[in-house]
Image: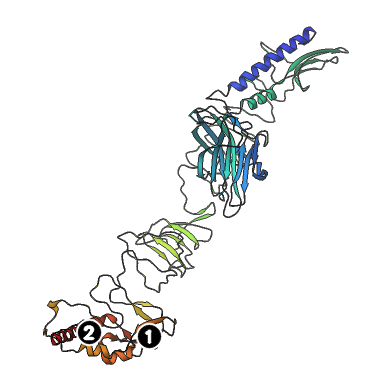
């Protein structure tokens, strides 16, 4: 406490001031429970935090306090997770907690997660209880975003926070985190520091003061100085008649008479003077019939008439302004009307034919949008128009005011394309499918063919067809399946000796020349055609092409042959009996 009267008084004053500053500083943060995370705004560097391979770095970014304060950036140039984790802190069991933080990421980030990794008292593993409070999310890429989540501690006695940067498939993914606030409660709040950090801030703001009085060679000095030795305020009465008052503010009450004064800066509520000369005058209200000045600066004024060769006006409110040329860094308007010019790299103009106006890029033919004025259908949007407004170029894309879209260039689709039940797609040129298309509800061909790849002696392509429930189908040769009695007449028992024909057919084994496939049993079309012509067919458009055998056409002959065999068997049974 000191051993002199002045020393004791100084110590008591310092203790009182310390307690007052602490109460003011810590008292600001009284909403919900205390923040459990130390160095939660990274003011003390990376203390109390760790990261994968020390990839967590303190950086400044324009999204956060205009680049004036540090925040944490966790980078990842791989497809694996990189971690940013806090120190371990104690929790109360089965208690609701809130986790708030601020952050953003660049466009390369695949996603990020946030975990509360806890354990019970006495456990030695890093964590035994996992709570995933944020799963596979992305933050804003254009601003610093506020995030708030709640969780229940369950059986956790202590835990730590882990932020996961889940990497990127291309480039480096950057995750930015700051102002981490974890506290007991259930409502979001404005960030506040850990109590120890708040006390440290209060101690930094504390400046102990002391008063010194000295007298040297006729001079008398009284000074208040802080712990660093800086003068806070003081009075110096010099022996040479030069006096000096030091301080932020000096208040003189009553009337004051100064014979002659040089004042660098003064604020005067009311000034009355016979003659006023000034190099510069700054005033809230200037009421004068006329003001003549080489330079006149007015912050807020009602001016009926102003003529100026060169004027800088911070804010101007006017009913109407006529100007030959206006140059502005930022223009803000409730209603902007312009008919020609450039805005932000875009060009405003009117078509040469006079039919409406448009807004386009620097190159008017490259990209643009019309306003729809004029008669008939007009072009609403266009890209790569060409070089003549009278017609679209061979690679143009455009949408007209009637809603129709025209694309004369290539179109690439990288995801699902849906056509509604009422839509219709017409293909007038050659359409190529690199992969086999799937038609869930079938395909209607009308009277045309489906052509498939394959070789035949006459060249060209082979026609194919498939069916599910049809009466007949054409495979470049005629096939008839209808058998309804109502379609037939002149019905008599057949006289065909089917068993003789079947016995004359030579059954052979063979290998196909092209694919070497072996067939154990089959017919030769040329031989079968001489015996049962109807089972052999050929392409009517290519008579010299390959012959085809329809084995199903043999079924009637087989049935008749079985009947003939059965008659012979019955005849033999009667003879034997």
- From what the image shows, is residue 365 above or below residue 535? above
Give the quarter of the image for residue 120.
top right
* Display colour scheme: rainbow
* Category of crowding for the residue at label 2, using alpha-carbon neighbours closer than 10 angstroms: few (below 14), some (14–19), many (at least 20): some
Mark identifier at residue 509 = 1
As rendered, which of 439 and 242 lies closer to the eye? Answer: 439
**Circle 2 SS class:** helix
Give the quarter of the image for residue 510.
bottom left
Query: Where does the C terminus fall, quadrant-wise?
Result: bottom left
- From what the image shows, is residue 464 above or below residue 195? below
Residue at image point 11% right, 84% down? 491
Count all numbered tags in the image, as a single digit. Answer: 2
Residue that sits furthest to the right in the current view: 217
Mark identifier at residue 557 = 2
Q: Horizontal and vertical percent for residue 447? A: 28, 76
Sequence-wise, the earlier of marks 2 and 1 is 1
Q: Horizontal and vertical percent for residue 524? A: 34, 88
Residue that sits furthest to the front in the current view: 577
As rendered, which of 335 and 34 lies closer to the eye? Answer: 34
- From what the image shows, is residue 96 above or below residue 516? above
Query: Where does the N terminus fall, quadrant-wise?
Result: top right
As rendered, which of 76 and 564 lies closer to the eye? Answer: 564
Apparent side of residue 13 relative to residue 180 in the rendered image (left or right) = right
Residue at image point 63% right, 31% down? 38
Apparent side of residue 168 relative to residue 369 in the rendered image (left or right) = right
Give the quarter of the image for residue 560.
bottom left
* Category of crowding for the residue at label 1, using alpha-carbon neighbours closer than 10 angstroms: few (below 14), some (14–19), many (at least 20): few
Q: Horizontal and vertical percent for residue 167? A: 58, 49
Foreground disc of the pair 2, 1: 1
Distance from label 2 to label 1 (Cα)? 22 Å
């Amino acid at each position: 406490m000191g051993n002199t009267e002045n020393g004791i008084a100084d110590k008591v004053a310092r203790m009182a001031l310390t307690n007052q500053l602490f109460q003011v500083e810590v008292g600001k943060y009284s909403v919900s429970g205390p923040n459990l995370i130390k160095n939660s705004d990274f003011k003390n560097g990376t203390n109390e935090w760790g990261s994968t391979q020390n990839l967590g770095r303190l950086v400044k970014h324009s999204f956060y306090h205009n680049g004036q304060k540090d925040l944490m950036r966790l980078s990842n140039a791989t497809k694996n997770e990189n971690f940013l984790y806090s120190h371990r802190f104690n929790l109360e069991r089965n208690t609701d907690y809130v986790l708030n933080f601020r952050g953003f990421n660049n466009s390369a980030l695949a996603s990020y997660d946030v975990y509360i990794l806890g354990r019970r008292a006495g456990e030695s593993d890093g964590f035994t209880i996992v709570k995933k409070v944020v799963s596979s999310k992305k933050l804003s890429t254009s601003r610093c975003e506020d995030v708030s989540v709640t969780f229940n501690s369950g059986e956790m006695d202590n835990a730590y926070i882990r932020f996961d940067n889940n990497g990127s498939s291309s480039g480096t993914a950057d995750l930015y985190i700051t102002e981490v606030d974890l506290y007991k409660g259930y409502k979001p709040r404005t960030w506040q520091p850990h109590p120890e950090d708040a006390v440290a801030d209060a101690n930094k703001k504390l400046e102990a003061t002391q008063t010194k009085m000295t007298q040297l060679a006729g001079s008398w000095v009284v000074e208040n100085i802080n712990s660093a030795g800086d003068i806070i305020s003081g009075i110096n009465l010099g022996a040479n008649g030069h006096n000096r008052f030091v301080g932020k503010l000096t208040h003189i009450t009553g009337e004051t008479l100064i014979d002659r004064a040089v004042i660098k800066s003064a604020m005067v509520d009311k000034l009355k003077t016979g003659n006023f000369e000034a190099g510069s005058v700054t005033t809230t209200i200037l009421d004068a019939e006329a003001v003549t000045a080489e330079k006149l600066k007015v912050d807020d004024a009602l001016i009926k008439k102003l003529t100026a060769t060169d004027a800088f006006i911070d804010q101007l409110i006017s009913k109407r302004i006529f100007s030959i040329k206006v140059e502005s860094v930022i223009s803000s308007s409730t209603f902007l009307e312009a008919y020609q010019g450039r805005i932000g790299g875009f060009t405003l103009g009117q078509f040469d034919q006079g039919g409406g106006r448009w807004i386009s890029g620097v190159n008017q033919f490259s990209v643009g949008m019309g306003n729809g004025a004029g008669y008939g259908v007009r072009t609403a949007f266009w890209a790569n128009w060409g070089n003549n407004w009278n017609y679209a170029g061979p690679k143009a894309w455009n949408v007209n005011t009637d809603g129709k879209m025209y694309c004369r260039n290539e179109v690439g689709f990288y995801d699902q394309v849906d056509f509604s039940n009422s839509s219709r797609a017409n293909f007038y040129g050659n359409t190529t499918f690199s992969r086999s298309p799937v038609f869930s509800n079938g395909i209607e061909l009308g009277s045309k063919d489906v052509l498939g790849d394959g070789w035949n002696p006459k060249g060209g392509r082979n026609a194919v067809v498939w069916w599910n429930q049809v009466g007949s189908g054409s495979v470049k040769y005629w096939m008839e399946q209808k058998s309804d009695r109502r379609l037939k007449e002149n019905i008599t028992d057949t006289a065909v000796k089917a068993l003789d024909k079947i016995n004359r057919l030579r059954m052979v084994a063979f290998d196909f020349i092209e694919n070497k496939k072996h067939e154990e049993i089959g017919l030769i079309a040329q031989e079968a055609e001489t015996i049962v012509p109807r089972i052999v067919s050929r392409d009517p458009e290519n008579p010299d092409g390959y012959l085809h055998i329809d084995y199903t056409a043999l079924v009637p002959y087989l049935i008749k042959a079985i009947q003939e065999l059965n008659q012979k068997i019955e005849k033999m049974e009667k003879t034997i009996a």
